[in-house]
Amino acid sequence: MEEDLRVIISGGGTGGHIFPAISIANALKAAHPGVQLLFVGAEGRMEMTRVPAAGYEIKGLPVSGFDRKHLLKNVKVALKAIQSRQMAKKIAKEFQPDVAVGVGGYASGPMLSACSSMGVPYVLQEQNSYAGVTNKLLAKKASFICVAYEGMGRFFPEERIVMTGNPVRQELLAAKVSREVAIRSFGLDPSKKTILIVGGSLGARTLNESVLKHLDLISQSGVQFIWQTGKYYSAQIQEELEKRGKPKNLYVSDFISDMAKAYKAADLVISRAGASSISELCLLSKPCILVPSPNVAEDHQTKNAMALVEKDAAICVKDSEAPMLLLPKAVNTVNEPERLVELSRHIGELALPDAAAKIADIVWKLGTKVRETKRQKAQK
């Protein structure tokens, strides 16, 4: 039966990989309710909880990344890679996928290699403007590579690249809440300009330091702030604010569960430059100041940010300069209405909507083509 197409989705490690993976799965299910989906992730990583929470089955591999600082530890990494490859083959034999999807991250390497060895085609989804190591290796045998940035031919075979954009969390686009209601939900004043500071679910040390260094500026700015500190830094920050006094115009939370409201409330967003965050900002046309994390492979967040800066679609502040410069620049920028309009227009022009549906369609067509080929061979 056509609707029983079987698809493996593999990868993860960070929200930047997991949110797109779940969005693709949701798009496949919405268009083809009978599709059979199985996720494969890395044991101990966040996908092992986030994917089941989204309603999908996931299997974990003991795979881990190469340790550049402690080379002797890579003996264990190599053994885990061998074990993961064997487990991936077993998973593929049991599930019998028609097609696979890789979203980057450790687990996609052994899983897609196992699929390829069984003649199962796969589609890659590369979120960043600078391709990850796993996807660069897997691209050689990929049927299609779905990207969100121009110029990706320097990493992948040009003829297999499809410009789809990055899938984002659908609830952000579906939210109908007004700016006033959104701002009031944080206990703030709708008549004032609002800056959202968000460094991911775990937080970003530099962004937090930037706020703590400028509590006086925040108090006197006439602007209000929504600050997601991240769970890792929350206790330390609360202690600091109790000592020094929390400004009344500063809303503080370790984690904002309703990001749709947070984005709606914001006139300006301060964020790291992860691919998923940038895609959300583009689709929502949000003026932003990006502070690329220096702690990522190939410095890809700086490359992501500069792709926007070159089109005057974002402002970029270096991580090393952020503690001194970030908050004063944000306050100045949010008080320049014409600049906000300009940034909003330019970043909105870079949006690539319906990315998840486009990728799901590519996956579905590839899978059905493979299944039809198998059926024809069986009839001969």
Image (cartoon, helix red, strand yellow):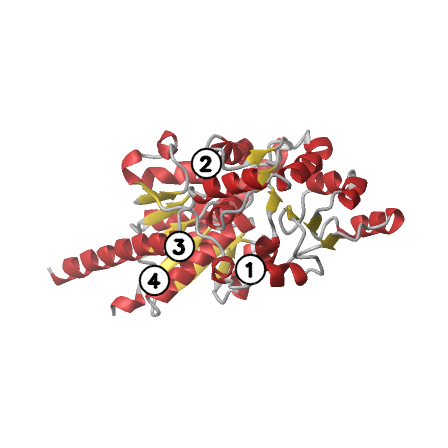
Element on which disc 2 rests: loop
Q: Quadrant of the N terminus?
A: bottom left
What residue would you read off at disc 3? 356
Closer-to-camera residue (200/44): 200
Q: Looking at the image, which is closer to me, 366 or 151?
A: 151
Mark closest to the chain's N terminus, 2 or 3: 2
Residue at 31 percent of width and 56 percent of height? 361
Q: Secondary structure at mark 1?
A: helix
- Tags 1 and 2 in contact by the CB under 8 Å rule? no
**Label located before the other in sequence (1 or 2):** 1
Give how far apart the Cα atoms at labels 2 and 3 are.
Answer: 18 Å
Residue labelled with disc 4: 6
- Residue at mark 1 to residue at mark 4: CA–CA distance: 21 Å
- Of the numbered discs 1 and 4, the one sitting upstream in the chain is 4
Find residue 341 and report its horizontal and vertical position in percent.
52, 42
Say left or right for 227 vs 47. right
**Mark 4 residue type:** Arg
> Could you give the CA–CA distance between mark 1 and mark 2, rounded to whole angstroms?
25 Å
**Residue 304, visible in the rendered structure:** yes
For disc 2, the marked residue is 129
